Amino acid sequence: MARTAASQVSARARAVACGRTMMIAVALIVAIGLLADADHASAQPAPPPPGATQQAPYPSYSPFPSLTPGPPAQAQTPVTGPVGRSEEQRRAAEQYRIWRNALERRRQKRQLAARKQHQVEKKQKAAKRKEKRKNLAASRENQREIAESKGYKPVSDLVNFPKFFPGLGIIYVKPDTLPLGPFLCFDRDDRLVATVYMVPVKDIDDHKTLDAVGLTPLGINAPVDHVSFYFNPGHPGVDMPHYHFVIWHVSKKDEARVAQ
């Protein structure tokens, strides 16, 4: 019995303590509410004085776009310069384009002319190389034998004439071309050194027209270094006075090959 009474006293004490705690909590909540109402009242803006212009309220801030469609936005008008300036720029651009086109056409013409000139020079060089090879091949042949194959004969075999005549060398001629010639003069190595035409003085005095074969009677493009023209009173084969018209294919220095 003693334990039951003590238990009842302990339960009452706990109930009283719990009630006190709840009352304290309610009092705190009421005090906090009163303080919050006082702060809210102090935060309210004071009413404007009579006659003052009321400021429009600030729009509410919304962190997200509104789903309600607003009025359509007006298109911005592009900012442009004066009309005269744009026209000037257009004309300048057109003039620049015309100038560039003309410059390009001139460049193309120069390139075309350069290509044509290069082709012409290339052909000329090829022709010169071909002619040089031909002359080289002919020079390696025995030119005196070529003359004999074309009907030329030594003057010494036709008339009383030295086989080697100093100043002209070994002279060949076609009998049917006397007295004009041409006469072909060779050195002792059978190389052609000169072509001679013997023109009678009478034919010159009579103003006679003389026709002669080309300067290459052997078909060889022999160079012409210099020409001699002098009088001769006559010699076997061409007895009448005449002039020697000598076309030298060698230099004056190389004339020594037929000097003696």
Image (spheres, rainbow, N blue to C red):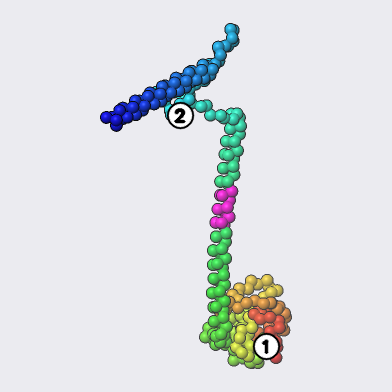
* Nearer the camera: disc 2 or disc 1: 2
**Residue 75 picture location, percent across and down:** 48, 26
**Residue 239 picture location, percent across and down:** 67, 85
- On the picture, is 218 further left or further right than 249? left
Residue at the outermost front position: 2
Task: Name above or below for residue 123 compared with residue 80.
Answer: below
**Residue 41 picture location, percent across and down:** 51, 16
Residue ID at (71%, 78%): 229
Verify whether residue 1 appears in magenta. no
Residue ID at (52%, 85%): 149
**Residue 233 picture location, percent across and down:** 72, 84
Query: Amino acid type of disc 1?
Result: Arg
Q: Nearer the viewer, residue 187 or 181?
A: 187
Q: Which residue is mark 1?
A: 257
Q: Earlier in the sequence, mark 2 or mark 1?
A: 2
Q: Dividing the image into 4 quarters, which one contains the N terminus?
A: top left
Most frequent secondary structure within the magenta stretch:
helix
Q: In this rendering, does residue 243 appear at all?
A: no
Query: Disc 2 on helix, strand or loop?
Result: loop
Q: Residues within 10 Å of mark 1 (few under 14, many from 20)?
A: some
Q: How far apart, in angstroms, are the residues tagged by discs 2 and 1?
A: 118 Å
Q: Nearer the viewer, residue 6 or 33?
A: 6
Q: Nearer the viewer, residue 173 or 38?
A: 38
Query: Disc 1 on helix, strand or loop?
Result: helix
Query: Amino acid type of disc 2?
Result: Pro
Residue ID at (56%, 29%): 79
Verify whether residue 104 appears in magenta. yes
Q: Quadrant of residue 113?
A: bottom right
The magenta-colored residue range is 103-113
Q: Quadrant of residue 7?
A: top left
Residue ID at (54%, 81%): 137
Q: Which residue is mark 2?
A: 63
